[in-house]
Image (cartoon, grey):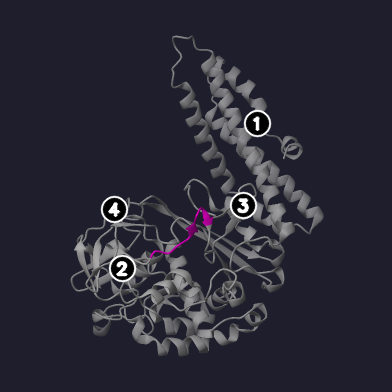
Amino acid sequence: MNRKMMQNLNLCTDPWLPVRMQSGDCRRLSLEAFFLHAREISDMVLAAHERIAIMRLLICITQRAINGPQDREEWDECKEEIVPKVLNYLQKWRPAFNLLGADGAFLQVSGVSFCGGSWKGLSKLNLSSAEGNNPTVFDNGAAGERRVELGRLAIDLITYQNFAPCGIIGRVNWLGNPYADSASAKDAPCNSVVHMFFMGENILETIWLNLCTIEEVSTVFSSIGKPVWECMPNGRNDEQSIENAQKTYLGRLVPLSRLVKIEYPENRCLLAMGIEIPVYKDGRLVFFEPFTTVVLNPKSSERSLVKAADMSRDMWRNLPALLHRFNSQGYTLGKLDQADLPEHYGIWVGALVSDNAKILGTMEDYYAHLSPSCIGAETERLHYELMEYANRGCSLCCKAVRKYCELLTSKKSEKQKNKNDKDNINKIAERAKLEFWSRMTSHKDKYVNLVRLKEEVEEWENELDHWLFVICDSAKATYELFAQRDNVRKLAAWSQALYYLPTKKILKDKR
């Protein structure tokens, strides 16, 4: 890294973004080099939550640069315009992309000072590090003195603004006035929410596939707005800029959820509550985030985001709900019809999972070589049907394990019975559930392949039969793990509870 980059980093001109080229080489690129070579880039080399944050940045830049697309017809023709228009835009706004500086630093505000709190180490911005409430998920510790390389710091800052967890945070004066009434900050808008992106043959096609049209945006937002670096709030009374950051499409796409001031030579940063990004109002969803999925509860008529609230639930099990966004009844930005999709594409799904202020980890999955026939109203029904087979298999497996435990407990005398037996049985059944889905996850490709083959009747029937066999085999293997038969009493319980295990006939008859 040269002397200039040691003092500062400009995201437009200095290399910081790690990518994998289609040749297989990995390198770092500036934003200008990234878009210039977009057709040669296979993918970005980032953790799940970092990918989400950087994709939102890239899409925000692209949509602002091309000032559209207006509708799906314009979207279909705009791919060739992306590179030249984005390069012109980045050249115009280079000063706004300086990572460090007293004024105009990227995603940072000027004129802030502490009125309560203390400086944090720069590693606090890295949500993968074990500092504060973050557990040792990715590393063994993050002391405040750890030095952070500037390229890494750029990724950390962008990601932190998207995913900062709730909790107590510093209080500041902004241009001489107290900014927040409370030191308690809310979750940033992407926290624990499942995001899904189309993946194309190269990064240019990936960005293009995930653009929203202004026509779509106008159904949700009052305005497409401006990126925050074009309209940085200047104090708490700058209502126009704050409204842009809160309520417009581009303003929310790269959020300013925390007020941040980085002092790089001192290896520290100031953190405080930023611009609150509204999501819910009176229990109803009022802003739909792009790349997320909103589902409608038919009973309460309330809409909610598909969230990653459970680290034990593998991403592929959420696929039916996630693909709901492509239904004509969907309530999500970024819908594509079958006719819009290329012959082959992929779907990436990911999330950062947190529990209150504690980061639990990340989840991600990728489904490659999909075809346009994999989405649509008819296919959505098929997704739910196939998943319902698996859900019923899991339910019957847990029922068999539970019955086995109950039969063993019932043979105890009243004195021998433990009042916690019921709780213990519930815990064993829960462990059996995790084991069942762990085994099913190793066969998730069969599930995706079934959706691909829905129009090949004979082949589909054979694959469906194999899918049902996998469900029954996973249930049986799980049962054998928890139901031992090393004595006569256990053998008797094992043979009786065996009756509850699923068979292909039961799954078909009672789906």
Q: Amino acid at mark 3?
A: Ser
Mark whose residue sits in front, 1 or 2 = 2
Prevailing secondary structure class for the magenta stretch in the rendered image: loop
In the image, residue 84 sits, relative to residue 313, either above or below, namely below
Q: Amino acid at mark 4?
A: Asn
Q: Name the residue at 70% across, 43% down.
A: 468
The mark found on residue 348 in the picture is: none
Q: Name the residue at 31% across, 68% down.
A: 259
The residue at which mark 1 appears reads as: 501
Q: Amino acid at mark 1?
A: Leu
1 or 2: tag closer to the N-terminus: 2
Confirm whether the magenta stretch covers residue 417. Answer: no
The mark found on residue 259 in the picture is: 2
Q: Amino acid at mark 2?
A: Leu
Label 3 CA crowd tier, 10 Å (few <14, some 14–19, many 20+): few
Q: Are marks 2 and 3 in contact (CB under 8 Å)?
A: no
Real-space Cα distance between discs 4 and 3? 45 Å
The residue at which mark 4 appears reads as: 140
